[in-house]
Image: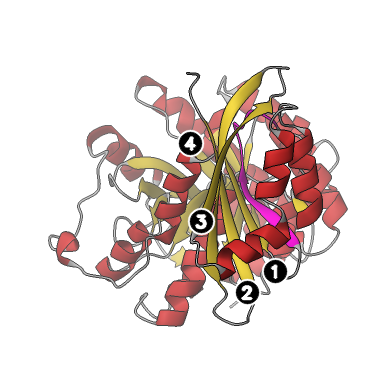
Amino acid sequence: MLFSEDAVRSAIKNKELQAFYQPQYDAVTAKIKSAEALVRWIQKDGTVIPPSAFIPQAEETDFIREIDWYIAEEVCQMLRKQKADKQIPVSVNFSRRHINEIRFAEKLSELVDSYDLPHSLIEVEITESAMVNEPEKILDWINTVRDAGFSVAIDDFGSGLSSLQFVKDMPADVLKIDKSLLSHNCENEKERVVLESIFYFAHRLHMTTIAEGVETKEQLAFLRTCDCGKIQGYIFARPMPEADYLRLCRHHMRADEPADILEIQTPASASALLMRVVFKRYPLVIFSNLNRNSFYMMAYQDFSATGCPSTGVFDELITHGASSMHPEDQEIFAATFDRHNLLKAYADGKSEVRLVTRQLGDDGCYRRVETTDYFVKSASSEDILVITLCENLPEE
């Protein structure tokens, strides 16, 4: 049964529409870190009308914007009540129709400011599907929201025709993994590979990750191996009315875990964690294909020089690298990492090539840098691959 717009307006007027809160927990510590506000319609006789009975119809018109703003104000009122205790950020869902709303960011700022709340307590949540159309418009919209001090979350990632392109281009802060990607309880190998890949690229883009719809200890155990940021789902807590949520935050900041969670053995890869450790040690990591004369940067942060191209022709990379070296080191650097010399070194049985040089930093000072090329044979072709690790060395 679908309800008319007039019926929903009457429910808003009678305060029958309420914000329910589903806590989001740290995946490792099981402590409450945030929550999502979800609309619920509770009639006077206690009958609960599911969102599916009125939200889809409201989304066909701008009426959905009234519902969203109503819930946003309910959240602000709740956060003001929470002021005596520790306030916890809450994500609020906003329909794609807000993208065309004039002064959206200013209006949200005025609402939050009227309750004397920090903007960091509100997270604007918009679905993945809303970003597929009019990417330039949504990009500008997200930027204005973030410029106003609010974080932005991409909701339901993986529920539709997910595009890594728009995730790459959208300056969002949070990626919420849709529960449909957990449909096989993380026991299916393909499902695990897909999830591992999503968490890996999200971390590389410096996005916080939240897994939605987590219900079993098997799912939780696997998600922890992927270094998932936060968990949202029935395994810890269902959506609850405001009073219950405030009580939970006040007295139970840690969720009760399944007793045997540590006994769960999930055959998952820890590659994402391994890469994070590598990137901490080596601020510059390059992947190259010597046969195809190509390369791209896998990591590039906190290195002494930042003028290196991110992808392109390997020979040009070496020419660029040599030009940044001390004049006395330029010739040996160019010769050591010459592509043909590297291929010969591999043919001679060497597993790596290592060289310490002095490189000119962005500050105009030369610093000792160790560059190591590790040879890898491609598993799918005859190509010879190289992983380059560059490390700033302490001064002697």
Q: CA distance from mark 2 to mark 3?
A: 67 Å
Which mark, by number, is residue 57? 1
Instruction: Indicate yes or no whether the magenta region holds residue 229.
Output: no
Q: Do callouts 2 and 1 mark residues in contact (Cβ within 8 Å)? A: yes
Secondary-structure class at tag 3: strand
Classify 10 Å Cα crowding around label 1: few (below 14), some (14-19), many (20 and above): some
What segment is highlighted magenta in the picture?
294-305
Reply above or below: 201 against 108: below
Task: Look at label 4 and name its amino acid.
Answer: Pro
Closer to us: 91 or 190: 190
* Numbered disc in front, either 3 or 1: 3
Given residues 394 and 17, the one toward you in this image is 394
Badge 4 vs badge 1, beta-carbon distance below 8 Å: no
Residue 80 left/right relative to 175: left
Is residue 304 found inside the magenta-colored segment of the image? yes
Mark toward the start of the polypeptide (4 vs 2): 2
| Image position of 35 (left or right of 68) | left
Q: List the residue tagged with mark 3.
A: 352
For label 4, the crowd category at 10 Å Cα-Cα, with few meaning under 14, some 14 to 19 and many 20 or more, is many
- Which of the two discs, 2 and 1, sits closer to the camera? 1
**Could you tell me residue 260's position as x and y percent?**
13, 63
Alpha carbons under labels 2 and 1: distance apart = 8 Å
Read off the residue under disc 4: 89
Q: Quadrant of residue 157?
A: bottom right
Q: Does label 3 or label 4 sit earlier along the sequence?
A: 4
Q: How is the image coloured?
A: secondary structure
Q: Secondary structure at mark 1?
A: helix
